């Protein structure tokens, strides 16, 4: 470590040296002129000589302080020699002590300068160490500030993720949930321009585009089934980060320009639960390197939350279906049918529109069930349920009323049309062979028809009328449609 001193500029240094030379020359002339040499009287009084004799002390001090030890020693030598010559030449004993005093003063000044320089050097080293410590601590403070900023950013993002998770839990319907997922992905990853959400179609391994989020514009998404990037994620079951969409070696024949829109980088994560592969969540940025590994880490967390939310939505939908659907036949359960019938009766009453219902019963079902077993009985019930679903029209509702009984609701349908459709069902059931215990058999059904408003104004009276006519059909020999009485 070296002593750091402020050095004067060359111009200032030259000016000071010139001033010092002028002072030395002037003082030399003054001292010579005031000194009493021989019998010649001095030009100035003695007090001037004594006063001038003390000026070298000031010059010695200035030389040491401003110009360093070399100049200080040089000025000291000049002062000692000059004052010694003047004292010897004038014969004045009072001037003979000045050279010794000057010499002693020069020695003290030199020593003082050296001590000052040593002290300054030590202080400079100490100051440098303090500055180094300050710099180190400043760097540590900056590092801690950066770390604090990064932690705050992560906390902010994790708070966003928690809010997103809460939003997913509140969105039980699949449509609302998918909208929440794509919007959350766009908000969470700031560099995203497009978010695409694909789900796997039921019963196949094909992707289907379900939701699109755009930061701006209205670019058309052509890949309704996904492209090479989405297929890669689906096959590998791994996240994908492509920082330059046109240059990734994994997709040599697949450029971003083929997508019909421009994107420079993309992220894609699989949506997977413990049970199955659900789909792909994909983010695109128009800029190359617009999406980073940090964004991928966030998207993976979001993908896990989205997968859980979608699975919960499927379960919720399934439970909702089970609440209104018979598990054996897929038809509406009795409670749901009765509620729907009541609602349709209110609507029909306000619109003064007709409405009809069918009550259907499998003929001799107990014989099949007792002789061939409950599995055979269940198969008969499933077959009738499947047939009723096949002949159902938009707006109709078919339900299982209990045991081997079924019921159909036909809004805006007159009695004559209901009878015609009931006859079609009866004929189709009779014409459909069913294999039971490796034997092909044919079954028949009896059907009772009731219509609003002729046969009743409430769900209870209509069902009673249909039930009464159903038993009339059975009493008349079964395999019939009865709409009177």
Image: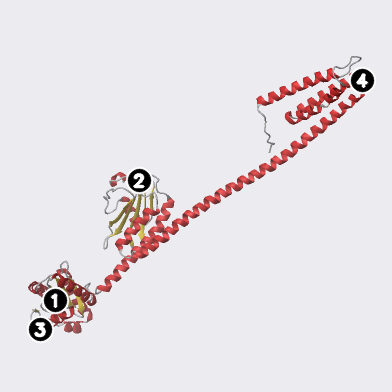
Give the label on residue 91, or none.
Answer: 4
Closer-to-camera residue (66/262): 66
Q: SS at mark 3?
A: helix
Q: Which residue is mark 1?
A: 358
Label 4 or label 3, whichever comes before in sequence order: 4
Distance from Cα at disc 4 to Cα at disc 3: 167 Å
Q: Residue at x 30, y 63 (%)?
A: 174
Q: SS at mark 4?
A: loop
Distance from Cα at disc 3 to Cα at disc 1: 14 Å
Label 4 or label 2, whichever comes before in sequence order: 4
Q: Residue at x 27, y 54 (%)?
A: 225
Distance from Cα at disc 4 to Cα at disc 2: 102 Å
Q: Which residue is mark 3?
A: 472
On the question of residue 338 being in view, the answer is: yes
Distance from Cα at disc 1 to Cα at disc 2: 60 Å
For the C terminus, give its image quadrant. bottom left
Label 3 or label 1, whichever comes before in sequence order: 1
Distance from Cα at disc 2 to Cα at disc 3: 73 Å
* Residue 394 position in % (x across, y down): 16, 66
Label 2 or label 3, whichever comes before in sequence order: 2
Mark 2 in CB contact with mark 3 (< 8 angstroms): no
Q: Is residue 69 above or below residue 377?
A: above
Q: Which residue is mark 2?
A: 286
């Amino acid at each position: 470590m070296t002593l750091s001193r402020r050095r004067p500029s060359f111009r200032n240094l030259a000016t000071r040296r010139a001033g010092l030379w002028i002072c030395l020359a002037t003082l030399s002339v003054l001292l010579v002129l005031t000194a009493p040499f021989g019998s010649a009287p001095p030009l100035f009084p003695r007090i001037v000589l004594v006063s001038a004799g003390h000026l070298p002390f000031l010059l010695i001090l200035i030389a040491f302080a401003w110009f360093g030890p070399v100049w200080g020693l040089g000025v000291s030598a000049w002062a000692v020699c000059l004052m010694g010559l003047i004292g010897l030449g004038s014969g004045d004993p009072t001037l003979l002590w000045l050279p010794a005093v000057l010499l002693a003063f020069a020695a003290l000044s030199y020593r003082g300068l050296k001590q000052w320089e040593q002290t300054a050097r030590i202080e400079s080293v100490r100051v440098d160490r303090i500055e180094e410590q300050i710099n180190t601590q400043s760097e540590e403070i900056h590092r801690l500030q950066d770390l604090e900023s990064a932690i705050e950013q992560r906390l902010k993002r994790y708070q966003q993720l928690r809010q997103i998770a809460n939003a997913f839990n509140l969105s039980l319907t699949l449509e609302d949930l998918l909208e929440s997922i794509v919007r959350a992905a766009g908000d969470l990853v700031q560099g995203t321009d497009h978010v695409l959400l694909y789900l796997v179609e039921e019963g196949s391994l094909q992707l289907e585009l379900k939701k699109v989020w755009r930061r701006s514009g209205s670019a058309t998404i052509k890949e309704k089934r996904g492209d090479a990037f989405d297929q890669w994620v689906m096959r590998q079951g791994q996240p994908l980060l492509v920082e330059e969409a046109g240059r990734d070696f994994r997709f040599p024949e697949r450029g971003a320009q083929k997508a019909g829109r421009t994107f420079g980088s993309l992220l894609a994560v699989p949506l997977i639960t413990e049970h199955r592969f659900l789909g792909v969540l994909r983010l695109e940025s128009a800029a190359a390197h617009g999406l980073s590994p940090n964004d991928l880490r966030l998207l993976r967390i979001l993908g896990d939350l989205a997968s859980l939310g979608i699975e919960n939505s499927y379960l919720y939908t399934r439970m909702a279906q089970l609440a209104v659907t018979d598990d054996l036949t897929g038809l509406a359960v009795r409670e749901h049918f009765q509620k729907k019938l009541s609602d349709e009766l209110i609507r029909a009453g306000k619109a003064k529109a007709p409405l009809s219902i069918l009550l259907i019963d499998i003929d001799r079902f107990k014989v099949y069930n007792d002789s061939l077993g409950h599995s055979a009985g269940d198969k008969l019930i499933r077959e009738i349920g499947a047939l009723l679903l096949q002949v159902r029209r938009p707006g109709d509702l078919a339900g299982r009323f209990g045991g081997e009984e079924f019921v159909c609701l036909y809004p805006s349908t007159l009695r004559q049309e209901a009878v015609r459709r009931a006859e079609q069902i009866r004929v189709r059931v009779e014409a459909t062979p069913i294999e039971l215990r490796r034997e092909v058999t044919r079954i028949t059904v009896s059907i009772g028809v009731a219509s609003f408003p002729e046969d009743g104004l409430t769900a209870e009276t209509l069902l009673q009328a249909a039930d009464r006519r159903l038993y009339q059909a059975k009493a008349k020999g079964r395999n019939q449609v009865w709409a009177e009485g």
